[in-house]
Image: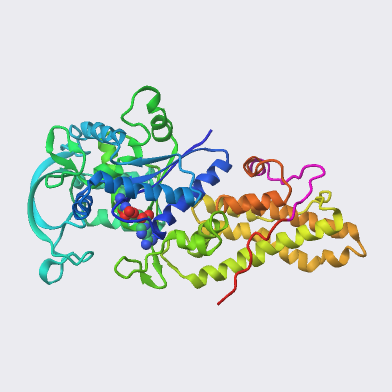
Amino acid sequence: MKTFYITTPIYYVNDVPHIGHAYTTIAADVLARWKRLCGEEVFFLTGTDEHGQNIERIAREKGVSEQVICDTNSLRFRELWKNLSIENDDFIRTTEERHAAGVRVLWDRLKTAKTPAGNPAVFKKKYAGLYCPRCEAFKTEDELNQPGNLCPDHGLPCEMTEEENYFFRLSDYADWFRGVMANKEMTISPESRRNEVMGVVQQGLQDFSISRARVKWGIPIPDDPEHVFYVWVDALSNYITALGFAATGEKRALYERFWEKGADRLHLIGKEIIRFHCLYWPAMLQAAGLPLPTRVFAHGWWTVEGEKMSKTRGNVVDPRAIVEEYGGPGIGVDVLRYFVLREVPFGNDGDFSRKALLNRYNAELANALGNLLNRTLQLLEKNNEGKIPPPSPFSGGTALENYQDAMERLAFGEALESALWYVNEGNLMMDREAPWKTVKTDREAALRTLFKSVTLLKTAAILLSPFMPAVMGELWKQLGERESLETAGSRFLREGVVQFAPGQTVQKGAPLFPRKEVK
Ligand code: MSP
């Protein structure tokens, strides 16, 4: 059985979850559901990134402990995912002991590791520079190219800071990395992001710091407890610590199955953290003698009604608000899941606008899909006691192949277009063949049309189910299916044909997607 490991970034708990976080998690969930439908063994991981100076500051401001901040905000993410029909297999928190144990094992390997050039991979160095406590990072003079050394992201003055830190000797990894790209041990998508990373390598790789002395809220470095691990060692390692990297015996089974033994290992991320995932993380894994991820995919960023989304602008989109606007749990969730993956080609930046959402909802979900179901079931109930007519063969075109190919490339928009092909085809055919007319003169012909229509609907339901699991489950019921969508869907993907049970009777219900008024 093929194995597939998919991860999202672990989200910082200094922020409340918004549409941007939901985007990555929904995309990962859609892919996980799709791979399960294809019969693969899937492990889907998400979680929260909980250490660092920002949490210390927030805890101080609120007068509570760091752990309380982390517990409260981590739970917000966990609950939102549950409400958005996310079926992750695990949820890792960097404040968990299983994570800290994994980081220590990784450290044990790193501290004695040699770079491809034969130098120690980790070394200690005194470092002085301008430091932004919000970014928790040193800034180069280029980045602070404005009076007062203000951080371009936070607008706060950066402080001259001197610290002795552990460093990772990334500067020794350029040739090795070019080799990894050449032999495709790991791929970076989309192409534009791959080029961006190659550009960084071309400009010269800088060593990066992996510890902090001023921060207490972190995992202490075992042999040097004055230091804690800095964010990128602490955070990136979640992808293996969650699988039981540091465990022994049976508890290590997931690690072996999903990281060591040839699984497809895909990190889904936003474009701003590509350097860490494509350069830092693979180099650390190589130093530790561990396999690399097989794929990194970086998607683009959402703006909101044309503007950058930010707390100060007050335009941060809460996914729960969208869910409520579109009908609450079930339907509202599915509309959100559908829209974010339909509106913008995955990999590009995009704009979240209420108008675009409303238009797509009405045109594609209410008018196209909802309407086809509605009229097909109505005609079957009126003219055939709701029974699915006898099969009549017809060609399904190339939409299925296109869909499969698009999903493999994470081209969710294209995949949805292929799924909608069945729906549009159905509506065109109904308009053309007008079974409500032909039924009066040639009943057989009308039933053939309706058979084709339910077949198209059933196929569309299977292909849309990773995106809209709740509403497609409802459509499925209205088609009178007895088998689960998952079982029938998997068989369809293996055999390529849609079948109905003898005597299967449709069950028309409430409209799937009630039309919404355009104000
Ligand atoms: N904790 C780090 C990641 C460590 S991974 C080992 C982090 N966390 S974060 O909370 O800032 O989340 C960043 C991720 O949220 C992005 O990579 C992206 O997946 C998602 N997004 C946050 N804002 C977004 C948009 N405006 N648009 C799209 N995705 C965005 O970075």
Residue at 59%, 51% (x, y): give it.
470
Task: Specify the farthest residue to the front.
Answer: 63
Horizontal side of residue 123 vs 16, given as left or right: left
Q: Is residue 27 left or right of residue 73?
A: right
- As rendered, which of 327 and 469 lies closer to the eye? 327
**Horizontal side, residue 375 vs residue 519: left or right:** right
In the image, 483 versus 507, the foreground residue is 507
Residue 430's place in the image compared with 185, above or below, is below
Question: Which span of residues is magenta-colored?
Answer: 491-508
Residue 516's spot in the image, x, y percent?
A: 60, 70
Residue 183 visible, this orientation? yes
- Front-lying residue, 240 or 504: 504
Task: In the rendered view, tell whether residue 277 sits above or below residue 432.
Answer: above
Magenta residue check for 143: no
Where residue 173 appears, as percent x and y from the top left, is 24, 45
**Residue for point 41% across, 27% down:** 253
The residue depicted at 91 percent of the width and 65 percent of the height is: 440
Name the quadrant where ligand 1 sits.
bottom left
- Residue 133 lies, in percent from the top left, at 17, 56
